Image (spheres, grey):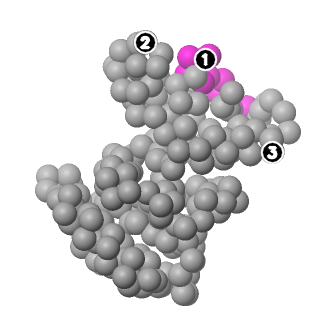
């Protein structure tokens, strides 16, 4: 389990460019987040996460040793949420990171404020994408879908599917409530019902399910 949220949000930063890595650490620390470790290669990133158990790992894709995708695949099952921070905005890279277990994906052109917000939202379990990337990912999964899923998966109601689509695009529960003109509690109820039906445990898993099944309109 990750540390309890009774203190500063804990983060590990993994990037093989020391100047960039130091800048990210400074931006996060200036916002009141606690950087508990750093790594310049993928193997060390896994070791540092195992030793410090941060709430969020901010991780580049291209690093010596294990790649960012391989690091994500290693640490996500331990409860560490992963925000990929990469120079690449290629759809294939985003797809691979999400399938490996990343909660969010941000390109390095993001501002310091956008990075801090993304880290906070990632820690909260929200799916976070650089604007435009979520739509590309969802569109690709729709294209890959061979047709309606009929594999015994419990059916969702139209409203549950609508909420799932918006959550998968990175909207928070409050933003979904505003979009659908319903209460925040109603949205949370739909999310919990969907998690229960699909036997999933958190929103990151819910987003991956939506992407894999091409459920978004």
Q: Tell me if 89 is positioned left or right of 173 in this view.
A: right
In the displayed image of the protein, which residue is found farthest to the top? Answer: 181
The residues bearing labels 3 and 1 have C-alpha atoms spaced at a distance of: 23 Å
Q: Tell me if 199 is positioned left or right of 214 in this view.
A: left
First-in-chain label (3 vs 1): 3
Q: Secondary structure at mark 2?
A: loop
Please provide percent x and percent y for residue 114.
37, 52
Q: Which residues are magenta?
A: 152-161
First-in-chain label (2 vs 1): 1
Q: Secondary structure at mark 3?
A: helix
Q: Secondary structure at mark 1?
A: loop
Please provide percent x and percent y for residue 3.
24, 60
The label nearer to you, 2 versus 1, is 2
Q: Quadrant of residue 175?
A: top left
The label nearer to you, 3 versus 2, is 2
Residue drawn at x 60%, y 17% is 157
Residue drawn at x 58%, y 55% is 98
């Amino acid at each position: 389990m990750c540390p309890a949220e009774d203190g500063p949000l804990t983060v590990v930063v993994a990037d093989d460019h020391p100047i960039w890595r130091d800048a990210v650490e400074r931006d996060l620390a200036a916002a009141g987040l606690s950087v508990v470790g750093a790594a310049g290669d993928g193997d060390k990133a896994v070791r540092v996460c195992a030793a410090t158990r941060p709430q969020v790992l901010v991780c580049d894709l291209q690093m010596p040793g294990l790649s960012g995708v391989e690091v994500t695949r290693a640490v996500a099952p331990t409860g560490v949420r992963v925000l990929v921070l990469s120079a690449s905005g290629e759809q294939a890279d985003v797809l691979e990171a999400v399938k490996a277990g990343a909660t969010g994906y941000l390109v390095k052109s993001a501002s310091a404020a956008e990075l801090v917000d993304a880290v906070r939202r990632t820690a909260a379990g929200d799916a976070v994408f650089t604007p435009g990337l979520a739509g590309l990912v969802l569109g690709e999964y729709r294209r890959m879908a061979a047709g309606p899923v009929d594999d015994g998966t419990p059916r969702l109601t139209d409203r549950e599917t609508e909420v799932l689509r918006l959550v998968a695009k990175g909207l928070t529960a409050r933003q979904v409530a505003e979009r659908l003109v319903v209460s925040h509690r109603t949205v949370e109820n739909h999310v919990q019902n969907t998690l229960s039906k699909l036997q999933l445990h958190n929103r990151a898993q819910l987003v991956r399910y939506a992407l894999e099944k091409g459920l978004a309109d």
